[in-house]
Image (cartoon, coloured by chain):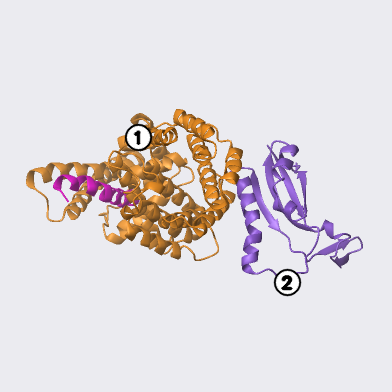
């Protein structure tokens, strides 16, 4: 790794560990102090390493510096609470040297517990994702704004409100009880799912940022399946889904950032190792009777790793979408189900079913109808592609539709 | 949007031997596709249940009888709950129900929420 890439990389992986450990030590109400100490540590690293060169073990350097900074902070705080506060409150507490535990076990535990604290039910979902990006992935407000296609100020406000809420609710940084863990885990998985989707589907043009989002979501998900208490079938299914999807990361976009549709992807660019991992976690997810939407989506993604069109493939995908929709409706699942229907049962039935969806303000709906009508009724196909073009928002989406229109006019 | 109960009734019980897993699969597909279609339109509230043909009927005086029912047509094979703007739309959505292709019937009833 190049020196100039090292600090951003360490920031992604180490920032959250330092914040999580310190926050666990101080309590969630001091989250901003934990963040300040971590940020100061990286600032010092950027200054010192630039002048004196890299330390032998950069990660250990970061831990030592943040530990010292934390100790200084606690000393000052102690002086206040022992010397100043008693004058006001007339109480005393014994002076104790705090233990700052940066062992890998405590780092892992703290991060996991932090994940559960952030996904506290009192925090709105959007803010949970923002906080996860901020605290667990070390993303700045600007990067988060970029991922959400909004401005920095909105994100600042959203993060500040969420942190205030964590303070007000006195959320403790610990794994909830066994009974509560499953409830909370659902939110944790939703957050990771959205985090990953944000990277995978986001319309942001920043490809590096998007890939980072996916990698971070997978890293956090891996932590869940490596801990006995959170290693549930659904957590494994979600990780499997992420592996299958990210196996196509390199194949789904060309160097100009244009979308390459599934049918046109070069399967040699699919990452075989990730596909294998996906299958591994999918197998691990099949314990127990509970069937989550992640199980269904991972199974659909599994069938998509077979490039060849077979009746078996599309019939399986269709039935998985049928079940997924029965579990939870979403417009995108409805559209994908109809595409699978055209492959499994033929275009005639798919056109009838597609028109029932009536998602008329969705450009993907018109793109689907365009491709279903192509070679059946080209006039209608063209009409739908043109409507899709007028509704599409990003230039990458527009390019795909324009290519379809060009094909029709040939 | 209101919710409607669709009740499926078979008209006859076949004496054929139990279907093979493959036959079972091909019998299920029209149902899975039809319910998938309702779900894709966001009109499916509950996938309901299929009902076994074995049953008991209780009558006043704590009398318990086994099926058969007065008429085999009354045997309910299953039910689902859907969502629609009107009972006419609900009936329209039921037109493709595979039960009709099997000679059975679909009864559409408006659910009245309990106060």
Location of residue B65 with respect to A111 vertically, above or below: below
Q: Residue A99: where, in percent of width, then height?
A: 27, 56
Q: Colour of chain A?
A: orange
Q: Is residue B35 visible?
A: yes
Q: Residue B63: where, in percent of width, then height?
A: 89, 65
Q: Nearer the viewer, residue A98 or A346?
A: A346
Q: Colour of chain B?
A: purple
* Viewer-nearest of discs 2 and 1: 2
Instruction: Name which residue lies at 48% across and 37% down.
Output: A367
Badge 1 is on which residue?
Answer: A145
Badge 2 is on which residue?
Answer: B17
Q: Residue B43: where, in percent of width, then height?
A: 64, 43
For label 2, count other residues whose C-alpha is less than 10 Å away and answer few (under 14), some (14-19) or many (20+): few
Q: How far apart, in angstroms, are the residues tagged by discs 2 and 1?
A: 63 Å
Q: Which residues are magenta?
A: A1-26
Q: Is residue A273 magenta?
A: no
Disc 1 secondary structure class: helix
Residue A164 sits in quarter: top left
Chain of the residue under label 1: A
Residue A112 sits in quarter: bottom left
Chain of the residue under label 2: B
């Amino acid at each position: 790794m190049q020196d100039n890439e090292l600090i951003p990389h360490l920031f992604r992986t180490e920032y959250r560990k330092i914040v999580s450990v310190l926050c666990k030590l101080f309590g969630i109400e001091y989250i901003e102090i934990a963040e300040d100490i971590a940020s100061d540590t990286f600032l010092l690293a950027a200054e010192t390493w630039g002048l004196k060169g890299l330390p032998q073990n950069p990660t250990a350097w970061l831990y030592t510096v943040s530990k010292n900074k934390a100790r200084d902070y606690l000393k000052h705080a102690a002086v206040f609470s022992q010397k100043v506060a008693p004058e006001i409150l007339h109480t005393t507490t014994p002076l104790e040297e705090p233990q700052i535990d940066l062992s890998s076990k405590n780092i892992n535990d703290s991060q996991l517990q932090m994940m559960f604290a952030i996904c506290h039910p009192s925090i709105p979902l959007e803010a949970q994702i923002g906080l996860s990006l901020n605290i667990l992935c070390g993303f700045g407000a600007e990067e988060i704004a970029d991922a959400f296609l909004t401005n920095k100020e909105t994100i600042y406000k959203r993060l500040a409100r969420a942190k205030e809420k964590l303070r007000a609710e006195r959320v403790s940084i610990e794994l909830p009880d066994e009974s509560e863990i499953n409830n909370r885990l659902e939110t944790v998985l939703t957050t990771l799912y959205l985090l990953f989707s944000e990277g995978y589907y986001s319309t942001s043009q920043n490809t590096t940022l998007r890939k980072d989002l996916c990698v971070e979501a997978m890293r956090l998900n891996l932590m869940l399946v490596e801990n006995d208490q959170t290693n549930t079938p659904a957590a494994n299914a979600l990780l499997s889904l992420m592996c299958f999807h990210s196996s196509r990361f390199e194949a789904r976009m060309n160097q100009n950032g244009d979308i390459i549709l599934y049918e046109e992807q070069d399967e040699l660019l699919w990452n075989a190792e990730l596909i294998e991992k996906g299958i591994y976690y999918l197998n691990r997810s099949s314990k127990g009777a509970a069937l989550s939407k992640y199980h269904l989506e991972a199974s659909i993604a599994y069938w998509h790793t077979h490039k060849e069109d077979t009746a078996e493939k599309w019939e399986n995908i269709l039935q998985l979408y049928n079940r997924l929709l029965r579990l939870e409706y979403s417009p995108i699942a409805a559209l994908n189900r109809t595409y699978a229907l055209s492959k499994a049962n033929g275009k005639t039935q798919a056109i009838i079913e597609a028109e029932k969806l009536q998602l008329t303000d969705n450009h993907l709906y018109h793109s689907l109808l365009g491709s279903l009508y192509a070679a059946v009724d080209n006039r209608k196909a063209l009409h739908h592609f043109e409507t899709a073009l007028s509704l599409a928002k990003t230039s990458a989406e527009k390019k795909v539709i324009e290519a379809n229109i060009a094909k029709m006019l040939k | 949007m209101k919710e409607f109960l669709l009740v499926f009734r078979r008209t006859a019980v076949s004496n054929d031997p139990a279907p093979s897993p493959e036959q079972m699969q091909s019998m299920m597909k029209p149902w899975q596709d039809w319910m998938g279609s309702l779900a894709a339109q966001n009109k499916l509230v509950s996938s309901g249940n299929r009902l076994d043909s074995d049953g008991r009927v209780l009558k006043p005086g704590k009398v318990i009888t086994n099926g058969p029912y007065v008429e085999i047509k009354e045997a309910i094979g299953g039910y689902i709950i859907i969502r629609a703007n009107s009972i006419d739309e609900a009936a329209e959505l039921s037109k493709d129900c595979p039960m009709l292709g099997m000679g059975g019937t679909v009864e559409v009833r408006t659910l009245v929420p309990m106060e």
